[in-house]
Image (tube, coloured by chain):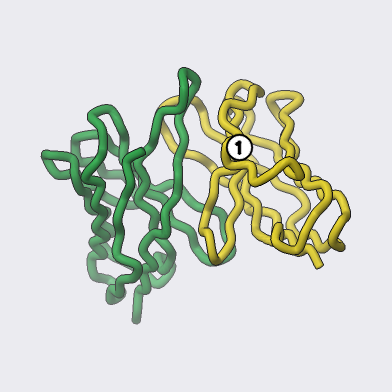
Amino acid sequence: DAGVIQSPRHEVTEMGQEVTLRCKPISGHNSLFWYRQTMMRGLELLIYFNNNVPIDDSGMPEDRFSAKMPNASFSTLKIQPSEPRDSAVYFCASSLGEGGGYTFGSGTRLTVV
Amino acid sequence: DAKTTQPPSMDCAEGRAANLPCNHSTISGNEYVYWYRQIHSQGPQYIIHGLKNNETNEMASLIITEDRKSSTLILPHATLRDTAVYYCIVRVWVSNSGYELNFGKGTSLLVTP
């Protein structure tokens, strides 16, 4: 199993540009989570999908952030327009329903200049 | 949501047992305790979880007090590679569709030679 795959690993973009982060969950997992990690705020849950349906997006910071899960094997997190304060490491995780643990990807380090 | 309290940092000598405490005094009867760790620059890694009974796997042991208000993660023979931030999390139920893990600040464990 290749685990949770995120791309790109690193992204540097200019303020105002659109950024799209991608995640491929583990095959068969039905829950997917997007987290953001910064030194100041630690790991924050942004949004949670169950069976491709967004369940809780209360952690999405503002309308500039959007997430989609068009099918069970792919999800995107988009920031438009990006701002320097969006600089962080973004993690995607997946899990198989109840019980067990989440498997995290290696993260995307986003730098907005 | 049940909150957790962990010491910000701990040291442990290599080869000794590392005992990481966690307080979760507001935990509800059906809420699980999860432990994750994050090695620098990597995604969080699942370690173990439990409800009432003590649990053990190849990585660690989890001791939960009878009143469930606290728990201890035990790494029986710590190695240098166990140096990481360890998160104690109470899994919370969200609507009728699933669970969320909300990470706190964790304990930074330093294993020394």
Q: Quadrant of residue B108?
A: bottom left
Q: Mark 1: which secondary structure?
A: strand
B94 to the left or right of A92: left
The residue sitting at the bottom extreme is: B113
Residue plotted at (68% across, 25% down): A72
Amino acid at pointer 1: Ile
Q: Seen in the image, is A71 located left or right of residue B103?
A: right
Q: Depth check: A15 or A54 in front?
A: A15
Residue A106 visible in image: yes
- Point out residue B24 in the picture as x, y percentages from the top left corner: 25, 46
Q: Residues within 10 Å of mark 1 (few under 14, many from 20)?
A: many
Judge whether residue A3 can be spotted in this image: no
User: In screen coordinates, is A22 left or right of B92?
Assistant: right
Above or below — where is A97 with respect to A18? above
* Residue under pointer 1: A47
In depth, the one of B65 and A36 nearer the eye is A36
Q: x%, y% of residue B109?
A: 36, 68
Residue A58 or residue B96, whichever sits in front: A58
Q: Quadrant of the C terminus of chain B?
A: bottom left
Chain bearing mark 1 = A
* Image quarter hosting the N terminus of chain B: top left
Residue A85, image x, y percentages: 70, 61
A28 is higher (above) or lower (below) than B53: above
- In the figure, what tint was chain B given? green
In the picture as drawn, the residue positioned furthest to the left comes out as: B66
| Residue at screen point 36% across, 63% down | B107
In the image, which lettered chain appears yellow?
A
The spot of residue A61 in percent (x, y) is 64, 46
